[in-house]
Image (cartoon, rainbow, N blue to C red):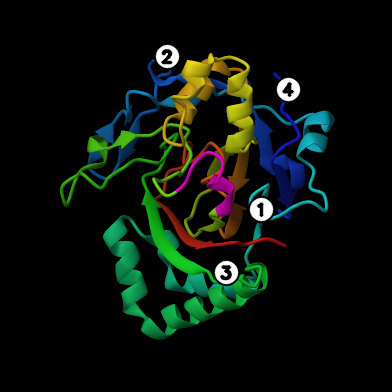
């Protein structure tokens, strides 16, 4: 199936199009053997929630037509474009000095921030200086420090119900998903801004996404489902419906090397992060806003 001209990519990465790959779609998670995760004292095969769909692994370079379908134009904004690039050299050097990339676990990440308050304050100010021109004259805010184990194919999981000190093997991973909440609908998901995620680890990580806004995915489902069925589709279950009926719609994968970022409206399209192939702890910092350039 060919990708549509919907969500675009503004690519400022040094590797350009070489940072992008594409596959032939998705499969139900039970039809896909997850990679073994072995890190520190844990070894496990990730398990998924019952309705999860995952990417196929037949990654390849994009054709000229596919790159053209993703090419950015003057209509770009904070919800119809994924922006990818590198942070400024001074900010990169500051984070390298903090040493998050050497951390072995989540606790060590935070100890390194706490160990040098002036350097942490400097990083915060440099981040603010970097983000302010991208913020579209709107407020932005720190969301989280994300920490994931290496070699996890799709990293998102709901951990809110797990006990303190849980093991990674206890997670149930979401598969490719959208970040919608009860506050939004399929029609309004594009109104909730976007996020910037910066790779602060030692290895590359990946953003996987389907370049369709939720409204377009919903429109495509209208061609497959009866009126009664389409009435059951909502912001929470639309991934399951979409991947069941469009398993051949491609997934795009963007490589994020250390100190590279993506900006994306993750409420508004299907996506996930990946650390597959890495050997060190994955660390990223996330801000919410309405970033664009």
Majority secondary structure of the magenta segment?
loop
Q: Position of residue 131 (x, y in %)?
A: 60, 70
Dot 3 or dot 1: first in sequence order is 1
User: In this picture, is 110 found above or below 158?
Assistant: below
Numbered badge on residue 2: 4
In percent of the image, x 56 and y 43: which residue is there? 207
- Disc 1 target residue: 84
* Quadrant assignment for the C terminus: bottom right
CA separation, marks 2 and 1? Answer: 32 Å
Mark 1 vs mark 4: in front: 4
User: In this picture, is 209 found above or below 264?
Assistant: above
> Is disc 3 surrounded by few (<14), some (14 to 19) or many (20+) residues within 10 Å?
some
Q: Is residue 87 magenta?
A: no
Q: Position of residue 126 (x, y in %)?
A: 56, 78
Q: Position of residue 280 (x, y in %)?
A: 41, 49
> Is disc 4 surrounded by few (<14), some (14 to 19) or many (20+) residues within 10 Å?
few
Mark 4 vs mark 2: in front: 4
Left or right side of 41 for 182: right
Numbered badge on residue 92: 3
- Disc 2 target residue: 31
CA separation, marks 2 and 3? Answer: 40 Å
Q: Secondary structure at mark 3?
A: helix
Mark 3 vs mark 4: in front: 4
Q: Is residue 187 magenta?
A: yes
Dot 1 or dot 4: first in sequence order is 4
Dot 2 or dot 1: first in sequence order is 2
Q: Residue furthest front?
A: 227
> Is disc 2 surrounded by few (<14), some (14 to 19) or many (20+) residues within 10 Å?
few
Question: Start and end of the magenta stretch?
Answer: 184-191
In the foreground, 33 or 144? 144
């Amino acid at each position: 199936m060919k990708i549509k001209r919907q969500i675009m990519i503004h690519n400022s990465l040094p590797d350009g199009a070489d940072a992008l790959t594409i596959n032939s779609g998705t499969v139900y998670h039970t039809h896909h053997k997850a990679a073994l995760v072995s890190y520190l004292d844990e070894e496990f095969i990730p398990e998924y929630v019952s309705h999860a769909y995952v990417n196929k692994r037949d990654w390849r370079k994009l054709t000229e037509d596919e790159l053209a379908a993703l090419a950015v134009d003057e209509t770009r904004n904070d919800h119809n474009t994924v922006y990818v690039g590198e942070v400024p050299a001074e900010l990169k050097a500051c984070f390298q000095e903090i040493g998050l990339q050497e951390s072995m676990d989540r606790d060590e990440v935070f100890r390194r921030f706490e160990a040098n308050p002036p350097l942490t304050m400097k990083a915060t100010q440099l981040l603010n200086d970097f983000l302010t021109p991208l913020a579209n004259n709107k407020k932005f805010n720190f969301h989280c420090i994300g920490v994931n184990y290496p070699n996890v194919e799709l990293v998102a999981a709901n951990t809110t119900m797990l006990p303190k000190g849980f093991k990674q093997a206890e997670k149930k991973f979401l598969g490719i998903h959208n970040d919608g909440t009860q506050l939004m609908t399929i029609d309004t998901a594009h109104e909730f801004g976007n996020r910037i995620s910066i790779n602060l680890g030692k290895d590359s990580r990946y953003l996987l996404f389907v370049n369709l806004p939720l409204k377009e995915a919903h429109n495509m489902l209208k061609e497959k489902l009866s009126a009664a069925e389409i009435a059951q589709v909502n912001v929470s279950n639309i991934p399951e419906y979409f991947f069941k009926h469009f398993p051949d719609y491609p997934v795009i994968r963007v490589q994020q090397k250390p100190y590279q970022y993506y900006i994306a409206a993750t409420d508004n399209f299907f996506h996930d992060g990946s650390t597959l192939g890495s050997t060190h702890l994955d660390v990223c910092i996330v801000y919410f806003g309405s970033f664009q350039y």
